[in-house]
Image: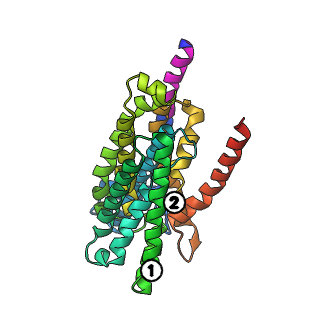
Amino acid sequence: MHLRLYDAALKDPIVIAGLLLLLAATVAVSLLAGRVWLPVAEVWHGLVSPQGDLAAAIVTQLRLPRAVLAVEVGAALGLSGAALQGVTRNPLAEPGLLGVSTGAALGAVLAIYFGLATHFATAAPLAGLAGALLASMLTIALGSGGGTITLVLAGAAVSALAAAGISLALNLAPNPYAAYEIMTWLMGSLADRSWLDVLLVSPFIVVGAAMLLASGRALDALALGEAQARSLGIHLRVLYVLVVFGTALAVGASTAVTGAIGFIGLVAPHVVRPLVGFEPSRVLVPAALVGAVLLLIADVVTRLIQVGGELKLGVLTSLIGTPFFFWLVVRLRKMAP
């Protein structure tokens, strides 16, 4: 038993180091790739001398903030997915389960609907973050005290309410341009994002990630059951607040800037569990790294596929993630007694 625990503890740093190397390589490819591929020398020159030529401007003002944002958003989605799967003890859980993503989407959609986004560049992200926080507060208010099943049902109800609001905004859009802007934003993208977007979401993602990482020990105890977790001194209400509000800050801020990007939070934890084991606390950091890698790869693919305009990131992640979701459901059905 002690030998197995030692081997597992030894394995985690190796896995994390390997994922960090993979992440660095993926970031490098993201800086090189695009409609116009840049030579390695020009990318390096642009990073070292950002006040240089056009290539330097492309690297530092377009591709680098896009890559940084992809790392932050992907890590937020992967980490939130791992924490939510741990707190609900549901392998199909992901950030949209508690209404956070849909609440953020509704907030940003309302900013577009009322024309605030055309006058203030930060209106949609700030409204999206407010929507995520309100949705998480409503989920906690409805679901606290009733266990994880009640929390999930409350999240589903809040998500349905926010989705209805989005549909209503589309139905009553004042003009075709507003409807087009809403639909384009809902499909999710990292295109045309700047350092302002990075600076806007980074504090919320950092605070949210810290809250989720702080829940690791409690998630391990909850894996034994709610009664066992209480006997070990875990306050379940505090745990729910940490996970829900941590997800609201990290994923809400991400969704508010990039739009709706699905399935990263679902897929990332399942990718790393065969590597690090099934203890929730050990899945958190590797899932964040895998989420960042997956979103970077998806973003690079959207730039390489030429279909008239750029393929939207949320569309691509859904196309890739849906078959994985079906496979996971079939696998769980075969494992069921």
Q: Which mark is residue 300?
A: 2
> Please, what is the dominant secondary structure of the magenta stretch?
helix
Q: Indicate the quadrant containing the N terminus: top left, top right, bottom left or bottom right.
A: top right
Q: Residue at x 28, y 56 (%)?
A: 199
Residue 288: quadrant of the picture: top left
Q: In which quadrant of the rendered view does residue 83 lie?
A: top left
Q: Is residue 91 left or right of residue 180?
A: right
Q: Examine the rendered structure and indicate whether residue 98 appears above or below residue 35.
A: above
Total residue callouts: 2
Q: Residue at x 37, y 37 (%)?
A: 237
Q: Residues within 10 Å of mark 1 (few under 14, many from 20)?
A: some
Up/down of 114 relative to 26, above or below: below
According to the image, label 1 marks what residue? 179
Seen from the viewer's position, the closer of residues 245 and 279 is 245
Q: What residue lies at 33% left-to-right and 57% top-to-bottom? A: 134
Disc number placed over residue 159 in the picture, else none: none
Towards the viewer: 324 or 193:
324
Q: Nearer the viewer, residue 210 or 96?
A: 96
127 sits left or right of 189 in the view: left
Q: Quadrant of residue 235?
A: top left
Q: Is-magenta flag for residue 224?
A: no
Task: Identify the element where label 2 is drawn.
Answer: helix
Tell me the amino acid under the disc marked 1: Ala
Q: Amino acid at mark 2?
A: Val
Boundaries of the magenta span: 3-15
Q: Position of residue 140 (x, y in %)?
A: 38, 48
Q: Position of residue 311 (x, y in %)?
A: 54, 69
